[in-house]
Image (cartoon, coloured by chain):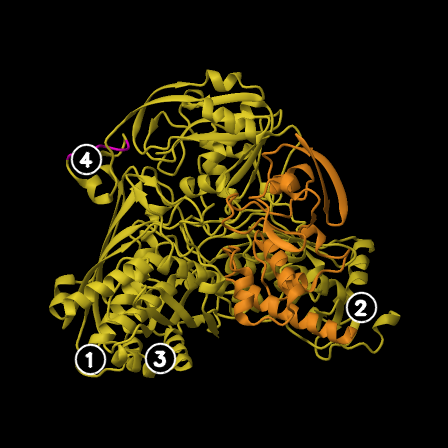
Chain colours: A orange, B yellow
Amino acid sequence: MKLLNLTINGRKHTKAVSPSMTLLDFLREELNLTGTKNGCDKGACGCCSVMIDDKPMLSCLLPALEAEGAAITTIEGIAKGNALHPVQEAMIEMGAIQCGFCTPAMVINGVHMLAKNNNPDDDEVKECISATVCRCTGYNSIEKALHLAASKMRRAAHDGS
Amino acid sequence: MAEDVAFKHIEKTSLIGKRIKKPDAPAKAIGKTRYINDMVLPQMLYGKILHAGRPHAEIISIDTSEAEKLAGVHLVITAKDTPDLKLGFVKDNAPLKSKVLCERDEVAAVAAESEAIAAAAIKLIKVSYKDLPGVFSAKDGLKKDAPQIQENFPGNKSLKFKFKHGDLAEAEAGSDIILDHVFNVHYVTHCCMGTSCAIADFDHNGKLTIYSQTQYPYNYKMDLAPALGIDPGDIRVIQPTTGGSFGAKLDVYPYEPVAAILAQKTGRPVKVLFDREEEFINSPTRQPAAIHLRTGCTSDGILTFRSADVLMDNGAYTSWGPTVPVIMMRTVSGHYRVPVIDFKAQAVYSNNAYAGSFRGYGNVQMTYATAQHMDMFAEELSEKHGMDPIEFHLKNAQKSGEVTPQKSYLRECVLAECLTTAAAASDYVNKHKTYTEACTEEGRYKRGIGLASSIHNAGGAKIHKSDGCGTILKMDDYARVTVITGASEIGQGIDAVISQIVSEELGVPPEHVTLVNNDSDIGPWDVGVHASRTTFIAGNGAKRAAIKAKKQILAAASKQANVTAEELDLRGGYVVQDKDGAAVIRLDRMLRQMHFQPTPDVVMVSDYYEPNSELEGKDHISDHSAAYSHAVHIAEVVVDTYTGEVKVEKVTMAQDVGRVINRMGLEAQMEGGLAFGLGFALSEEMIFEEGRLLNPSFRDYKVPTAPEMPEIEMHFIESDCEEGPYGAKGIAELPTIVIAPAIANAVYNATGIRFLNPPMSPEKVARAIWEKKQADS
């Protein structure tokens, strides 16, 4: 066991963890942050995506100790209080959520893309979610949701400037 | 008159056809939803199953002593702890096995303090096997000297089906063109994103609570009970949120009774959760089949007969897979007007994986064949007789009121409209001609367009004596509505549809309707999410219950307003005058008045809706669904003749939906259903070698991802189904059924090559193109 210090959704944590524990298991089992999903545990479905220092990463492949000192955002940290992120709002509005198991990963990847580029084209949107498997939606509604979120964010940026 | 209703007028509006959000979407969007996979109960132990990992073997001995000694292990069980417990509707399966008949066979199970300890304990179990020669195809299973797989099924013969109509010899003699092909439809699997999971918990009175992903909670009790030796009445099924199902959970599979047996023997709750590799190996597949299809047609383009001889690999045990001929034969006899039918199907036991139900249920397999034969006829008639391809389809398309040879009564049939709508919207005829001409030209990329259609049950399928659904509806003093329905939510969106229907009738916002449908101790009977039945059956039930509640309220209000109940309506949270919408009283006040009058009354109604369909009998002649529906897909593809990659650029679909209820949910089902069919057509394939799955991971089993999805143009044809809620029909399976043959027909249009054996993977397509080149030169 080794001590791990990191920040998750703005809150500091210090915990002793085993070197074999993945970040995904750390989040789900040690911190009860079950919003991040285990879809394959092999880095092949994308469901376990979290933001590590503002970059989407697969938490199932990463030993938790590798995240020493990192700032991590999970799906639980995307909304600000009761105010959902435009990506979350758009996913609901466009019917892009059915069973919802891939939704946290789709949101994490969408939020990351739109933070860098709030005017993505179709290919950029497809690329953004291409590493996450969804078995319910056929993806088109998720793509539409990301375009809608982008337009909302552009409008907000415009209104704010 | 109360002050807040003065001068208030509320116009009649309708929610039907509008976009209604899924009520559970916000919690899912913020990661708050607790899936069964996330659940931990107090004192819970973790169960793990030792699978045989070999296809056919005698178990000589099992030594569990080392596993039992491991700290944190509570219990190890094998078949000797569970004698006489049987599973499956021909009782050919068991929770734990004393002989190995397929790779996934459950040999032993452990309950331990943690997942890690359970996994370590599994590795300490020593099993000595004597491997036996196996059967790895249906054909081999039928051989005289084939090893017998199941002791009660000599000759390895499992289920068989037959249906005949008309004089085949005469029809063949009257045919100008006869097509004769064998289509080999492959193994695919559901790949639910949430892997299989069950948590079992016995109380001290011997009653089992099982947290389950099942999509048929009520019959599930009946199927689970014999595998535990308990009474079905002593099982309570709770359905936490589940990560998809698609037919995968329409049966009881061994991990569920294993969890229950571990829980029973340890006295602790036990959770069994598959990892992804276990999910691939130990989940049901789609039923594979070799379909020998013969179809006849006159030179005028009139179909004369269809005969199908289907050979199915049953695998080692019988789940829903080998029952799919029940639907396959409806396609053979009902996909276009075919006067003479000869259908046979035989399932044969083997040491392979076994199939369950899967969205599209037999029709994905059969339409892959029938829709390609339709395309072959259209090509030949166009080439030899100059017949327009759409005209050929239209000549054979049934019209409203027609009855198929199996007595499916097509009350409202708009196949012709689906065909003309999709063809016009995609410019099918012109594009098809252009691409046909370009087919033989040089060039790396070839374009093609392909049309396919199919028919499917759209008002349930009466395979049980009742195909009904119960609904209990209550309203409280604040005009909030609780609907307790038998219908299960597995992600498909019945939650939104029921809220919408109840709001429509009671004039309250959808968000004021709470759905309770995840506890078999609370909910009334239903036969589960399958057969595209839930909106139709549970929707009708919810509507009828809401109408009963409305009648009760309006009867009470009529006394007070001194008008007849027929002159009143419920709108926008008020009782209003029907003719001008003038508000009479706020609905919550009305409910409180009913409650606190001298003879108190509260609104609590119930309904059991049974569709007017007929039981699927042994002769297979019955109107087994309360509605039937058609869909047409037109796929436009680009084939890279160098790599063999098929890119579907656009799909134009036209589907008879009866009436749009929740437009958002409808579109979601269309796209998602299409994605399943696309994966089946192009990339998904379970590869077996002597009964062992070689590709149990998402890296080696390719499900569609965002870049593979085409642009989708949807046309909803509203046929106004007399029996459906507001005219709606069931919709969710047709998109999976129709797309694959549309792609196959488009690939033919692009390359001149027919792919009878899906998937049209790059490897297979590139090889076929190379072989054709060799043959042509």
Q: Amino acid at mark 2?
A: Ile
Q: Residues within 10 Å of mark 3 (few under 14, many from 20)?
A: many
Mark 2 on the same chain as mark 4? yes
Magenta residues, start to end: B145-150
Q: Chain of mark 4?
A: B
Work out whether B339 lies above or below B699.
Answer: below
Q: How far is mark 2 from mark 3, CA to CA?
A: 56 Å
Q: Nearer the viewer, residue B129 or B594?
A: B129
Could you say which disc has been placed on residue B428 in the image? 3
Mark 1 and mark 2 in contact (Cβ < 8 Å)?
Answer: no
Mark 4 and mark 2 in contact (Cβ < 8 Å)?
Answer: no
Mark nearer the viewer, 2 or 1: 1
Left or right: where does residue B553 sit relative to residue B395? right
B149 in magenta: yes
Secondary structure beneath dot 2 equals: strand
Q: Amino acid at mark 3?
A: Tyr
Mark 3 and mark 1 in contact (Cβ < 8 Å)?
Answer: no
Q: Chain of mark 1?
A: B
Secondary structure beneath dot 4 equals: loop
Q: Earlier in the sequence, mark 2 or mark 4?
A: 4
Q: Chain of mark 2?
A: B
Q: How far is mark 3 from mark 4, CA to CA?
A: 50 Å
Work out whether B123 lies above or below B548.
Answer: above
Please give the residue where the numbered disc 1 appears in the rendered image: B383
Q: Does residue B331 appear in this view?
A: no
Q: How far is mark 2 from mark 1, CA to CA?
A: 70 Å
Please give the residue where the numbered disc 4 appears in the rendered image: B146
Secondary structure beneath dot 3 equals: helix
Q: Chain of mark 3?
A: B
Please give the residue where the numbered disc 2 appears in the rendered image: B585
